[in-house]
Image: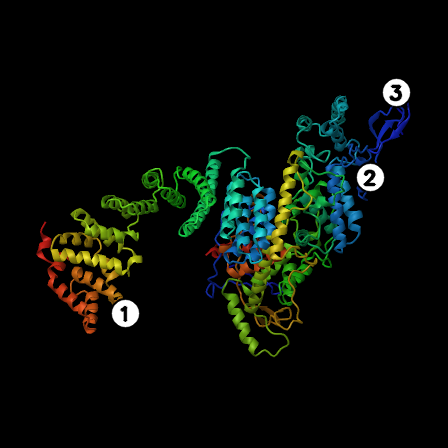
């Protein structure tokens, strides 16, 4: 409790005002000292004690309170973890895995769980930064004192960049933010610390999923985000009322683009290394992320014959991408390539399709005609697989789904009812615009009879569904490959003895950023079609898959390419 | 092709067979290019709204107003990020598209339209007057004259934002349209008075009201037509007012300024109005001709060119008659006049006159010279002869006369028409045949077959 003498009447007779401040019962002098506020809004199981231990300063009106950027991200992560749990991810994920990762991050980035945190310096700084009271003036020297202290302590980065950036902050008090450290946060030197961003919240989630070997790929996670099953856009709506968001906070928490696969993935790798995580749990052939299992899933989704699975397994085995050491993530290990499980699986399927059907816009149709011919005299169980029929069915569906997706993209609503503004001066204008948008939406929504936005789809691992029960005969799962294979020494082998490589030489990923380059017009149409199909399923660019296809091909044919260089020249033709 | 041994499992069974179907194209090698950033395909706010706009435009082109309205609800958000100073920013787009949808959508009424426009007015200071003006147009199209007038008055008295040259012009335009509506009221009152005039009815108040409308209209109309531009409707109304009150001198001044001031853009109508005014006031042939001469230069295919030709043919001056021939030939260069009997009869009359008088056959020769390459196919084909004969006998008569004189009696058109004419035992056509036969030398001269044409 507060035991100091009153500055005005020297009495020790304190009461507490509604705003949580101490006032003198004798002379009614109100101090700047506040009682420590226990705010339940902030208490989550991943709470950072070091930060919430200090006095939470509430402004006089009691409507807003101090908060830190990392607390914001913590809330975001919590919401995302809860959403994932609702999607069926095991409950350990939130409280054990993600929470631990986050604590580790706070510690490594010196925001909490260390002797002198960067946050404390920031907190002190914020006093002079955000306060408008006159009596904050005497606090300035103490702040500088604190800064120099921390510098000598060696806990804070001692280089001048930090000091200079802080002075910049205190000078430009016009740049404001709702959070205490919003302005400082954006100025931080990015090199030394991995600065938290919104896409990185997803990297955290994916890392936790991977740690638990949950049956969810990154592309799936991102799709759930886009479909709105996992909070990401306008996530600040979930912030408690008292956490005011404005100014620079918008730059941190408002996202205006969809999370990109590469970005989230790369950040995850960086993060895993930054946190010094040990080797992740093994990905064995019983894991969902193992290529054999994923291939099965994607074969089903692409409506391809189950028999192809046998072939994908053979390719996986031959190029050793099914081995535990290859598949398991070892953070910070730069010598091995890290695996994008979903992309790897679809690339294996494409390689198999190329092996069997060649996909050169010519041979696959010949083969299909051949299968059709043989189907006429086919008395065996399942019908022989005809690529032409499959193409027709898939093309129809894909075009329709693509169109639907494009329309959905165009119909995305990015703004929410809670208006955000950079500064108070802009508030009126922002509110006015928001009101007008709402009016327009109402008017034209009423006119078109579509006032309520369509309900979001139920979360599903499959985007395309094919069922044998359907009488339309559009399901190819049970079709047999015998129509296009030939028997050789009791084994079924592919008819075509040829293969074309997507590229002769892989580029250096260090130089180009990727192993191969893709231009649609340089490749056969049917190859492009297959790429497009899987790119649609994964919601990524076709070139990413093409990239992986090239890498796999080189693994598959590497021996031949290296051992007999004379064929290389013939390859060029 | 890479030659590959069969794997143990027989998976990679690729063998090099260059001979068989070995024409598989390999993708050309490329030099490493700039790394493609994932951001390229990253969907963001702007791109999503752009896609949305594309869907709206597609729907509008296909007149799917409901679909367009649906997508517009999603596009509306773009307003919140409209920090652009572009002319075609989201707010402009929403205004224009929204107006279009509300005009065409079957479930939208005047009430919705007005509330939409009122919102658009509050949006931008710069756009306020333009929105007001278009709103008034829309009200007028729906017969709501009083509301339109009120709207314009409000816009006129609006005082916000900075004064710019563009805004001054826009205000003038708004005032001009207000003047136009005053003129409309004036003319309504005038008609009432004129009707009752016959009944010897007198009402001072109606007359006074009419005069007050006149003053209001005249002030605003006079202002706008001082600014260079195309102000046909304003000029016409203003001149009508002036003429009614007997101020012919001012009217003449206005019209000649409108037609001849070089600061104004070239405008055929200005000359038409001027000509009509001169004609109404019985001005001399000379001034009429000079007015039409400019019109001929601007629009050789104008319908007044028939009058012009008639006027010139009657002229005593050789120069004018010569011009008349040029005018009528020029008229018939245009497809729109192809089957016009009047134009053809004008040409036939003048050509016949020239041939009979045997004066200046070189005029025809000179006109024909630039047309001999394409007129026979354009006007005098066998197909057209048949068609014209079936559809309009008098047209084919006039055309046959011209064809016979210029192209001779062997020309397809003349031969077909005169043959059909004689078969139908029409006297007119027999005379025509005789006439052409009599004047063969003219044809020879024109077509450069006679010796005379060789002479310098």
Q: Can residue B34 be seen in this view?
A: no
Seen at 16% across and 60% down, the residue is: B405
Label 3 Cα crowd, 10 Å radius (few <14 / some 14-19 / many 20+): few
Name the residue that disc number 2 marks. A39
Foreground mark, 3 or 1, reads 1
Marks 2 & 1, CB-CB < 8 Å contact: no
The colour scheme is rainbow
Which quadrant would residue B423 be assigned to in this image?
Answer: bottom left
Give the alpha-carbon distance from disc 3 to disc 2, as whole Å: 32 Å
Q: Find numbered disc 2 in the image and state the secondary structure of the residue it sits on.
A: loop
Give the alpha-carbon distance from disc 2 to disc 1, as whole Å: 98 Å
Foreground mark, 2 or 1, reads 1
Marks 3 & 1, CB-CB < 8 Å contact: no
> How far across and how far down the image is residue A428, in percent?
65, 37
Which chain letter matches label 2?
A: A
Q: Can residue A177 be seen in this view?
A: yes
Q: Earlier in the sequence, mark 3 or mark 2?
A: 3
> How far across and how far down the image is residue A42, in percent?
80, 41
The foreground one among A499 and B419 is B419
Foreground mark, 3 or 2, reads 3
Q: Find numbered disc 1 in the image and state the secondary structure of the residue it sits on.
A: helix
How many tags in the picture?
3
Decide if residue B39 is on the left or right side of residue A214.
left
Q: In this view, does B396 lie above or below B266?
A: below
The foreground one among A423 and B270 is B270
Q: Is residue A430 above or below residue B61?
A: above
Name the disc covering residue A9, or none: 3
Which chain letter matches label 1?
A: B
Name the residue that disc number 1 marks. B390
Q: In this view, does B63 lie above or below A158?
A: below
Give the alpha-carbon distance from disc 3 to disc 1, as whole Å: 120 Å
């Amino acid at each position: 409790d507060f035991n100091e003498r009153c500055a005005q009447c020297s009495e020790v007779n304190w009461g507490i005002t509604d705003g949580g401040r101490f006032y003198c019962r004798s002379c009614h002098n109100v101090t700047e000292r506040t009682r420590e506020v226990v705010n339940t809004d902030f208490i989550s199981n991943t709470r950072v004690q070091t930060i919430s231990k200090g006095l939470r300063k509430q402004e006089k009106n009691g409507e807003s309170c101090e908060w830190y950027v990392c607390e914001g991200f913590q809330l975001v992560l919590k919401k995302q973890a809860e959403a994932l749990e609702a999607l069926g991810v095991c409950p350990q994920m939130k409280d054990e895995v993600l929470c631990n990762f986050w604590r580790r991050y706070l510690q490594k980035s010196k925001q909490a769980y260390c002797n002198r945190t960067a946050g404390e310096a920031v907190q002190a700084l914020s006093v002079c930064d955000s306060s408008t009271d006159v009596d904050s003036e005497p606090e300035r020297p103490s702040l500088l004192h604190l800064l120099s202290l921390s510098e000598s302590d060696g806990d804070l980065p001692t280089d001048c960049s930090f000091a200079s950036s802080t002075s910049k902050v205190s000078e430009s008090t016009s740049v404001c933010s709702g959070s205490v450290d919003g302005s400082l946060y954006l100025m931080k030197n990015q090199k030394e610390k991995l600065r938290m961003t919104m896409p990185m919240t997803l990297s955290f989630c994916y890392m936790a999923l991977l740690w638990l070997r949950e049956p969810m790929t990154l592309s799936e996670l991102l799709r759930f985000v886009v479909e709105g099953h996992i909070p990401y856009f306008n996530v600040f709506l979930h912030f408690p009322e008292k956490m005011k968001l404005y100014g620079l906070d918008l730059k941190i928490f408002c996202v205006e683009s969809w999370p990109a696969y590469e970005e989230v993935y790369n950040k995850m790798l960086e993060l895993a290394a930054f946190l010094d995580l040990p080797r992740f749990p093994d990905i064995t052939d019983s894991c969902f992320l193992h290529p054999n299992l994923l291939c099965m899933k994607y074969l089903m989704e692409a409506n391809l014959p189950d028999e192809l699975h046998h072939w994908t397994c053979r390719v996986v085995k031959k190029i050793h991408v099914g081995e535990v050491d290859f598949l398991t993530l070892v953070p910070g290990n730069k010598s091995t390539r890290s695996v994008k499980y979903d992309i790897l699986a679809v690339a294996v399927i494409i390689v198999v399709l190329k092996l069997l059907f060649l996909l050169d816009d010519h041979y696959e149709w010949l083969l299909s005609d051949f299968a059709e011919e043989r189907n006429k005299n086919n008395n065996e169980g399942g019908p022989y697989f005809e690529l032409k029929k499959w193409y027709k069915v898939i093309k129809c569906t894909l075009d329709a789904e693509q169109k639907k997706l494009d329309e959905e993209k165009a119909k995305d609503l990015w703004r929410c009812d809670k208006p955000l503004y950079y500064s108070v001066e802009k508030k009126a204008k922002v509110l006015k615009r928001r009101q007008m948008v709402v009016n327009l939406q109402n008017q034209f929504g009423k006119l078109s009879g579509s006032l309520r936005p369509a309900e979001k789809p139920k979360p599903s691992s499959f985007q395309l569904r094919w069922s044998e029960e359907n009488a339309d005969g559009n399901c190819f799962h049970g079709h047999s490959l015998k129509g296009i294979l030939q028997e050789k020494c009791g084994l079924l082998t592919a008819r075509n003895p040829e293969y074309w490589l997507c590229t002769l030489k892989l580029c250096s990923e260090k130089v180009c950023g990727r192993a191969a380059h893709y231009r649609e017009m340089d490749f056969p149409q049917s190859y492009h079609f297959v790429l497009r199909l899987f790119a649609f399923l994964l919601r990524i660019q076709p070139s990413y898959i093409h990239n992986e296809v090239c890498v796999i091909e080189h693994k598959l044919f590497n021996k031949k390419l290296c051992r007999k260089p004379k064929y290389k020249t013939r390859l060029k033709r | 092709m890479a030659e590959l041994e069969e794997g143990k499992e027989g998976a990679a069974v690729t063998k090099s067979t260059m001979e068989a179907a070995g024409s598989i194209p390999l993708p050309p090698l490329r030099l490493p290019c700039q790394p493609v950033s994932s951001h390229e395909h990253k969907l963001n706010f702007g791109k999503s709204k752009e896609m949305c706009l594309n869907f709206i435009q597609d729907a509008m082109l296909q007149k799917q107003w409901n679909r367009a309205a649906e997508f517009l609800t999603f596009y509306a958000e773009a307003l919140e990020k409209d920090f652009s100073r572009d002319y075609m920013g989201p707010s402009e787009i929403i205004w224009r598209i929204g107006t279009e949808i509300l005009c065409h959508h079957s479930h939208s009424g005047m009430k919705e339209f007005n509330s939409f426009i009122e919102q658009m007015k509050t949006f931008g200071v710069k756009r306020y007057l333009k929105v007001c003006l278009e709103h008034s147009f829309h009200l007028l199209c729906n017969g709501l004259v009083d509301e339109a007038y009120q709207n314009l008055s409000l816009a006129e008295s609006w005082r916000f934002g900075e004064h710019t040259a563009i805004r001054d012009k826009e205000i003038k335009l708004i005032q001009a349209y207000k003047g136009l509506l005053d003129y409309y009221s004036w003319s309504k009152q005038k008609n009432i008075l004129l009707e009752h005039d016959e009944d010897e009815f007198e009402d001072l108040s109606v007359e006074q009201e009419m005069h007050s409308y006149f003053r209001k209209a005249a002030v605003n109309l006079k202002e706008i037509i001082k600014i260079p531009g195309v102000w046909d409707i304003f000029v016409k109304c203003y001149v009508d007012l002036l003429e009614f009150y007997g101020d012919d001198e001012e009217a003449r001044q206005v019209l000649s300024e409108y037609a001849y001031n070089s600061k104004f853009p070239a405008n055929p109508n200005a000359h038409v109005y001027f000509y009509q005014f001169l004609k109404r006031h019985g001005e001399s042939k000379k001034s009429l001709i000079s007015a039409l001469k400019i019109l001929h230069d601007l629009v050789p295919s104008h319908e007044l060119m028939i009058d012009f030709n008639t006027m010139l043919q009657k002229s005593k001056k050789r120069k004018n008659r010569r011009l008349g021939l040029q005018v009528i030939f020029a008229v018939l260069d245009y497809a729109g006049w192809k089957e016009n009997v009047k134009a053809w009869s004008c040409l036939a009359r003048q050509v016949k006159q020239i041939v009979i008088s045997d004066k200046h056959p070189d005029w025809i020769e000179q006109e024909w010279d630039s047309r001999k390459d394409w007129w026979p196919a354009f006007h005098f084909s066998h197909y057209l002869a048949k068609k014209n004969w079936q559809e309009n006998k008098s047209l084919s008569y006039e055309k046959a006369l011209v064809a016979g004189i210029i192209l001779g009696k062997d020309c397809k058109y003349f031969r077909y028409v005169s043959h059909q004419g004689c078969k139908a035992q029409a006297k007119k056509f027999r005379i025509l045949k005789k006439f052409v036969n009599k004047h063969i030398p003219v044809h020879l001269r024109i077509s450069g077959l006679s010796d005379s044409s060789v002479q310098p």
